[in-house]
């Protein structure tokens, strides 16, 4: 039996149609996340990044692109990407925040730090990129977690905040009970 030549091109399409494919993290604006959590409470997952930050780009490429991580974030959080050096004002919990040191001539490199960055991503007086900030549905900062992480390193943190374990136990206790539910690639 000979297979028609045209069917060889369709086979990969049919096989891929049967495999669930993650759509990636569904990023929304900070204003939209605040509005949604008022209607349907969920914590926020805010990626605080800069355009010049190499580890931020690695986080996008290697971690946020992971299908299991993206599906988990989409299910349990409202996800926001926030440029820590943006010149755009934002409304945060009823307060307008800006970047007074923003220089439009320096948009391709380092720039002033946005007031929202200082408010949510500060760890012991230090700002670092990337920082993923976990925020409860009442817009209280739960934890800013600085630095690059793999999907495997991020999974327990996502579970701790995404499933509300932080309300019942400290992180160290949670880690003593944590078992990964993700399959290894």
Image (tube, grey):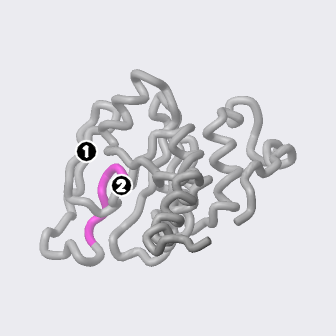
Question: Can you name the residue that lies furthest to the left here?
Answer: 105
Res. 90 mark: 1
Mark 2 or mark 1: whose residue is earlier in sequence: 2
Q: Which residue is found at the position 38% from the left and 29% from the top?
A: 36
Q: Which residue is found at the position 63% from the left and 61% from the top?
A: 151
Compared with 134, 184 (above or below) is below
Question: Can you name the residue that lies furthest to the top here?
Answer: 39
Nearest to the observer: residue 79 or residue 10: 10
Residue for badge 2? 82
- Is residue 56 visible in the rendered image? The answer is no
What span is in magenta? 111-116
Give the SS element for disc 2: strand
**Circles 2, 1 touching at the beta carbon (< 8 Å):** yes
- Is residue 68 visible in the rendered image? The answer is yes
Please state if 118 lies on the left or on the right of 146 as rendered: left
Residue 31 on image: x %, y %: 30, 38
The crowd level at tag 2 (other Cα within 10 Å; few <14, some 14-19, many 20+) is: many
Q: Main secondary structure of the magenta part?
A: loop
Question: Can you name the residue that lies furthest to the front here?
Answer: 1
Q: Which residue is found at the position 71% from the left and 50% from the top?
A: 156
Quadrant of the drawing holding the C terminus:
bottom right
Q: CA distance from mark 2 to mark 1?
A: 10 Å
Please state if 135 lies on the left or on the right of 184 as rendered: left
Residue 120 on image: x %, y %: 44, 48
């Amino acid at each position: 039996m000979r297979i028609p030549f045209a069917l060889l091109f369709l086979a990969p399409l049919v096989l891929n149609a049967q495999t669930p494919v993650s759509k990636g993290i569904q990023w929304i604006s900070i204003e939209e996340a605040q509005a949604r959590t008022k209607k349907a409470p969920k914590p926020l997952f805010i990626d605080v990044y800069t355009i010049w930050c190499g580890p931020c780009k690695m986080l996008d490429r290697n971690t946020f692109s992971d299908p299991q991580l993206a599906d988990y974030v989409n299910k349990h959080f409202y996800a926001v990407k926030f440029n820590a050096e943006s010149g755009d004002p934002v409304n945060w919990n009823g307060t307008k925040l800006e970047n007074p040191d923003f220089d439009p001539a320096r948009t391709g490199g380092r720039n002033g730090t946005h007031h929202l960055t200082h408010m949510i991503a500060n760890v012991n007086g230090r700002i670092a990129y990337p920082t993923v900030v976990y925020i409860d549905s009442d817009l209280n900062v739960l934890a800013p977690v600085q630095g690059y992480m793999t999907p495997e390193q991020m999974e327990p943190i996502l579970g701790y905040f995404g499933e509300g374990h932080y309300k019942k136990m400290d992180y160290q206790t949670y880690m003593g009970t944590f078992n990964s539910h993700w399959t290894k690639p």
